[in-house]
């Protein structure tokens, strides 16, 4: 792993690692405000076009919440650990049925062994490239809810534990694994029901989570590590992908596309990653870095195989 002190000055490290409670709070508030705004758009102008737009925007913010949970898992969302973990869990992870306490050790293992045999996320990048037909089928499964159904079914099975366990033990495990997610989602349904719009929960929370959120998570997974030039070079085993404002709205929220910079410097909060890239380029590292001009370019590479070498993939693997 790259030693930051060999690349950055002490002043640069100090500036890049600065966390901000104000920035963290504004990011979380922004995610939920966008969700509320998209829901309000459908309430005010209910038609198929606004529903489709809201599903895509909200699915993008659901990924955004997962990204903010990811920052919290690194201890970067807020300065105080209790605040960081509490808000990261209840306002970011649980609403999208993720658990930061389970995610953190898994994800840190990914960082320690990026693109190596012990990387738990290697299964996400190893199958590529695949054929165009295979990629289309995967995205179709995502957009029609089949991927979400598989993931939630396995997640529920894991949360309940083995059938031979006593029901009290299975219930205790369920509370630990999925209790927070169920509680926050019930709270959302109660709030929407109280304002007379209960239907927004299935239409504009569950539906985006089961469709658009799954598809863009797959695209992100592909862009970050699939078909990288060198699995053993820290500057080339992870990819940064340029994104315009529309792509950042719908697919790459909260600077998640700066994935190489995140892997190089784990101590940098998400909102400082663009600055980290500028510093690296100014120091002459630009030619060494794996950077692609956009997600379309990455997907073309991902679907460039004439035949598929791999079949199948873990239904619950979902790197953030």
Image (cartoon, rainbow, N blue to C red):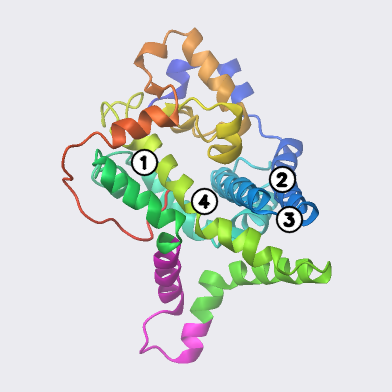
Secondary element at tag 2: helix
Using a 10 Å C-alpha cutoff, classify the residue at mark 3 as few (fewer than 14 neighbours), some (14 to 19) or many (20 or more): few
Q: Using the numbered discs, state the Cα–Cα distance from disc 3 to disc 1 in whole angstroms.
A: 48 Å
Q: Which residue is mark 2?
A: 34
Look at the image and give the residue range highlighted in magenta: 148-171
Q: Which residue is mark 1?
A: 112
In the figure, residue 156 lies in which quadrant? bottom left
Q: Which residue is mark 4?
A: 212
The quadrant the N terminus occupies is top left
Secondary element at tag 3: loop
Residue 294: give x, y in percent of width and height: 45, 26
Q: Which residue is mark 3?
A: 46
Residue 70: give x, y in percent of width and height: 54, 46
The residue depicted at 59 percent of the width and 32 percent of the height is: 246
Q: Nearer the viewer, mark 1 or mark 4?
A: 4
Counting residues from the start of the chain, the first of labels 3 and 2 encountered is: 2
Q: Using the numbered discs, state the Cα–Cα distance from disc 3 to disc 2 in whole angstroms.
A: 17 Å
Q: Are marks 4 and 2 in contact (CB under 8 Å)?
A: no
Counting residues from the start of the chain, the first of labels 3 and 1 encountered is: 3
């Amino acid at each position: 792993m790259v030693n930051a002190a060999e690349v950055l000055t002490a002043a640069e490290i100090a500036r890049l690692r600065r966390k901000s409670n104000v920035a963290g709070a504004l990011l979380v508030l922004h995610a939920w405000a966008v969700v509320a705004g998209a829901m309000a758009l459908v309430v005010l102008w209910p038609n198929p076009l606004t529903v489709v737009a809201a599903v895509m925007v909200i699915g993008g913010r659901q990924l955004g919440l997962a990204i903010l949970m990811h920052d919290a898992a690194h201890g970067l969302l807020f300065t105080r650990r209790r605040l960081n973990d509490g808000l990261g869990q209840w306002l970011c992870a649980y609403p999208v049925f993720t658990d930061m306490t389970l995610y953190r050790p898994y994800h840190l293992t990914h960082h320690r062994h990026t693109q190596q045999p012990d990387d738990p996320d290697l299964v996400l990048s190893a199958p590529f490239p695949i054929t165009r037909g295979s990629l289309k089928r995967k995205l179709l499964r995502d957009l029609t809810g089949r991927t979400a159904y598989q993931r939630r079914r396995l997640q529920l099975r894991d949360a309940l534990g083995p059938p031979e366990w006593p029901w009290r033990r299975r219930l205790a495990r369920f509370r630990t694994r999925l209790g927070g997610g169920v509680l926050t989602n019930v709270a959302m349904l109660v709030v929407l029901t109280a304002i007379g719009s209960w239907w927004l929960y299935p239409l504009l929370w569950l539906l985006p989570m089961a469709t658009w959120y799954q598809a863009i998570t797959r695209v992100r997974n592909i862009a970050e590590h699939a078909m990288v030039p060198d699995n053993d070079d820290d500057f080339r085993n992870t990819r940064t992908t340029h994104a315009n404002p529309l792509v950042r709205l719908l697919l790459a929220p909260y600077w998640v596309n700066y994935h190489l910079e995140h892997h190089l410097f784990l101590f940098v909060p998400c909102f400082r990653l663009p600055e980290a890239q500028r510093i690296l380029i100014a120091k002459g590292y630009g030619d060494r870095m794996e950077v692609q001009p956009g997600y379309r370019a990455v997907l073309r590479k991902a679907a460039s195989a004439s035949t598929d070498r791999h079949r199948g993939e873990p239904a619950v693997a979902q790197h953030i």
